[in-house]
Image (spheres, helix red, strand yellow):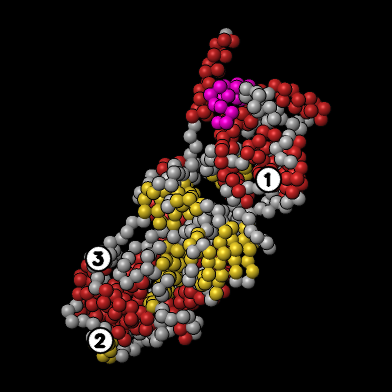
Amino acid sequence: MILGLIVPWYAYINHVTTTIAHDRFEIPSVIYARALELYSNRKLSAAALNFELDLLGYQPVNGSPGIGQYHQQANHYEIHTKGFHFSDGQDHATRIKLTLNNNRITTISPNLARLEPKVIGRFYNQDFENRRPIVLNEIPDSMVMGLQAVEDRDFKHHHGVSWSGIARAAVKNLMAGGIVQGGSTLTQQLVKNKLHYSEQTLLRKLHELLAATLLETKLSKQEILALYFNEIYWGQNGRIAIHGVVEAAQFYFAKNVQQLNIAEQATLIGLIKGPSWYNPYKHPKRALTRRNVVLNSWLETGVIDDTTHQTAKNTPLKLSQSRQIKGDYDNYIDVVKRQIRARFSSAELKQKGLRIFTHLDPYIQYRTSQTAQKTDQWLSDQVETAIVVSHSQSGGLLALTGSKSPQSHFNRALLAKRQIGSLIKPFIYLAALETVPGFDLNTELHDGPISIKTPQGPWQPKNWDNKGLGIITARQALVQSRNQATVDLGVKIGLDNLLKFLNKLGLNIRHNAHPALFLGALELTPFEVQHLFSLFASRGNTSQINAIISVTDQDNRTLSRAVQPRKQNINIAHIDAINTALNAITTTGTAHRLTTTFHLPKPLFGKTGTTNNGRDSWFSGFNQDYLMTVWIGRDDNKPTPYTGSNGALILWANLFKNL
């Protein structure tokens, strides 16, 4: 009977350990911001550079910087990078010297350098475990030997279970009248973690002992150590569990494992005993005491010498302060998810450890979020906002904010379809240039009462000032955003022809559209508006906003690059003609406050948009660097006191000024 129980039990544990030995980690795919490239004459402010360095966990020092440190004296910087394995090759840690003047890099050595990109998110499995495997020979020897010195000094000699260690722990616990020491080997700890044992019963302890013994027959000591370093739990970042030494080094010190100094290595090894109890962010004194206990153990066992021991004990914790705040990049990642799931399955994203490089600029994202959060200060606490920022020429998505509140779960930039009002007008005039023979912006239009028959009765649009200017040029009508003149032009184009043209630009509009379409009776999200205006910002080079630059696998092989949009077949002279009018709008038209009140540097281009009773306030504008779209409105679609020029434009101007 006993044999009948033991045989299946042994078979079960044997199967479990075989599974552990052949297990492959599910590795979440990592989403990166763009890497900050540094070269002569690049536009870069000291505020932006310092923000990036702090975000990446670089520590300011007074003397010559070590890896992951920088020294700043006035406008001179010396930065010791950490290195990074980019898709185009390995960047090794290097020293960069540069000088900033008038928000530009004026001198730099070497001529071209880049900082590693910031991790902005991941695709987690259902357990929300964060892990990136590492091979044992990439972990410092002192850390490998130090782990054994603290957790399992008999590791090299036992076969999974240290009976002498168990006996020693039993004696100490008996003398103390409680559990003060465990007798578990590294192999037992590994089994316990793999099997998710959270409580100890006699049966589970027997499971653990047999499993540890069997595992040592299937894996070498080196393989067990490697598995341990990649499996062990090192703490919690919100709901995300930090597993493995790679993520622990990044989370606590913003460093690669190979770059950890002795004090940092000892801090991490000390944390294994109790990641919550010794959490250095919450309990720095406990963590420091525990680290020094580890250092004493390393001195005692010869892992380090006396000089190294003293230096490490006198070193403060120096934790990374760059921990990501929840919500910093969530809205942007929504776009990444949309654009990548057409190319990769959910399983691939959660298990294969892909590396997704994006256009996100952390400093611009920070400024964008800050601008949105000041909506109540500049306007009203009754309205919400959404802001989208991209590169004018390439269409790369630099930043996106879907709310004025970091706690909001509704991404208005992607999900809020709102009427766009006068934002449609540049496209009406572009359609006329493309489709109406002999039309140009000097063509005369009638800005006065007009009536169009519809199934619902006559439609009689009004101007925003309830006045008519009579005969005016198309340029004046666009610059001054005249409704009646625009409808006059819309009739000349024809509703069907306009629909065909707008669909050509990527808008899917039903063919039973009302003539109010001439004045923007069309619902789009701020992100869709950004797509449209990229046609003007890029002078026809792109009409697609891309978040993703490229995707690589764990071996840095490129799997996918940004989809290159097909160029629109539109006469560039016509685009330039519209841009001339968009420029005039920012100097003498409805957006003149940009240059007359805010004194923003010229040239600027843009268009205001307002819907009935101020339900939607828009401004989409650009210069040679940035295209930005801002929307203001109420979630319940009730009226507001804002037009495009006294609502969205205020946020746009303040954001642009900070960039």
Residue 566 forms part of the magenta stretch: no
Disc assigned to residue 525: none
In the image, is 515 to the left or to the right of 423?
Answer: left
| Nearer-N-terminus badge (2/3) | 2
Q: Is residue 234 above or below residue 149?
A: below
Residue assigned mark 1: 262
Q: Amino acid at mark 1?
A: Ile
**From mark 1 to mark 3, how far is it between C-alphas?**
62 Å
Image spot of residue 59 (x, y percent): 64, 58
Asked if the residue under mark 3 is in contact with the one under mark 2, i.e. CB atoms within 8 Å, the reply is no
Residue assigned mark 2: 442
Image spot of residue 359 (x, y percent): 44, 60
Q: Tag 1, which secondary structure?
A: helix
- Which image quadrant: the N terminus? top right
Task: Say few, some or many: other residues with alpha carbon within 10 Å of mark 1 (under 14 / 14 to 19 / 20 or more).
Answer: many
**Residue 436 in view:** yes
Residue range of the region highlighted in magenta in the rendering: 205-223
**From mark 1 to mark 2, how far is it between C-alphas?**
74 Å
